[in-house]
Image (cartoon, rainbow, N blue to C red):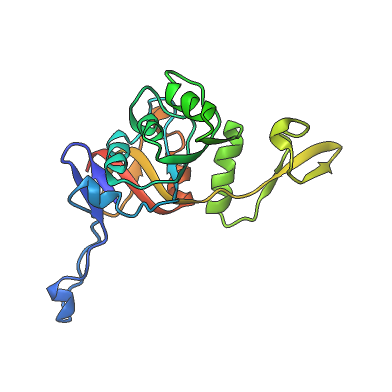
């Protein structure tokens, strides 16, 4: 599904039209849906949601607002940060809708939403190095069963994980990281779902799109 910030339009696969039913030309692929509510309708209670962005760059703000209004609970959020102020991801945390956050840098900007929930023990945190979180998602996208990384070996982040010595260096086994839904942000999209990005706004967006069962995209231009 694709969301256009300029036209507030969403895209998805449409049903075959009457021409196709009569044996004529099939309908074109067009992934637009009409409302933000339609776009996030696939997020269920307990879903793992991949939320793209690096700080405030490349974040699908309208999608996060729609998810808040949609009402799904007990969410596991995979993101680089844990939100800022009372917007987007932070708003979901403040509303008690997030059960767990998997991220690499939870304490950035105004992280009071995360801090309050974490101190109240209503929010679980899985801390991962930035490259590891990205590679775990790419690993699932590639259909691989996991990988060994020297990052976090011998630290608390590696506790409870399989450790092997490879070429004289300890490596920790990391499992693939899959999302039920990815909420991503791009600059441009066509009706088939091809996307382009601007500079650092690309960040985690492509890998998250590949690692989720359903990808919902917010774009500036169609």
- The relative height of residue 16 versus residue 38 in the rendered view (above or below) is below
Image location of residue 126, percent across then percent down: 59, 37
Image location of residue 158, percent across then percent down: 72, 37
Q: Residue at x 82, y 36 (%)?
A: 169
Q: Residue at x 33, y 28 (%)?
A: 87
- The relative height of residue 190 versus residue 87 in the rendered view (above or below) is below
Q: Residue furthest top?
A: 109
- The relative height of residue 45 versus residue 91 in the rendered view (above or below) is below
Of residues 52 and 107, the one nearer the viewer is: 107
Q: Residue at x 13, y 75 (%)?
A: 19
The number of numbered badges drawn on the structure is 0
Of residues 47 and 188, the one nearer the viewer is: 47
Q: In the shown orientation, is residue 187 left or right of residue 149?
A: left
Image location of residue 9, percent across then percent down: 18, 46
Q: Residue furthest bottom?
A: 23
**Quarter holding the C terminus?**
top left
Query: Quadrant of residue 165 in the image?
Result: top right
């Amino acid at each position: 599904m694709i969301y256009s910030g300029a036209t507030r339009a969403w895209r998805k696969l449409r049903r075959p039209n009457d021409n196709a039913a009569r044996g004529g030309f099939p309908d074109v692929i067009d992934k637009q849906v009409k409302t933000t509510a339609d776009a996030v309708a696939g997020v269920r209670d307990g879903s793992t949601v991949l939320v793209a962005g690096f700080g405030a760059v490349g974040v699908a703000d309208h999608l996060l607002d729609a998810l808040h209004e949609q009402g799904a609970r007990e969410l596991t959020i995979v993101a680089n940060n844990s939100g800022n102020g009372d917007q987007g991801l932070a708003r979901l945390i403040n509303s008690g809708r997030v059960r767990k956050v998997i991220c690499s840098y939870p304490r950035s900007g105004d992280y009071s939403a995360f801090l309050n929930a974490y101190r109240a023990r209503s929010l679980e945190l899985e801390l991962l190095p930035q490259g590891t979180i990205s590679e775990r998602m790419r690993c699932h996208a590639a259909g691989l069963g996991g990988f060994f990384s020297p990052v976090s070996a011998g630290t608390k982040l590696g506790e409870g994980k399989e450790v092997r010595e490879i070429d004289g260096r300890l490596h920790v086994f990391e499992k693939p990281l899959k999302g039920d839904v990815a909420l991503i942000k791009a600059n441009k999209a066509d009706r088939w779902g091809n996307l382009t990005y601007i500079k650092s706004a690309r960040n985690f967006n492509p890998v998250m799109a590949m690692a989720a069962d359903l990808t919902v995209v917010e774009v500036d231009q169609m």
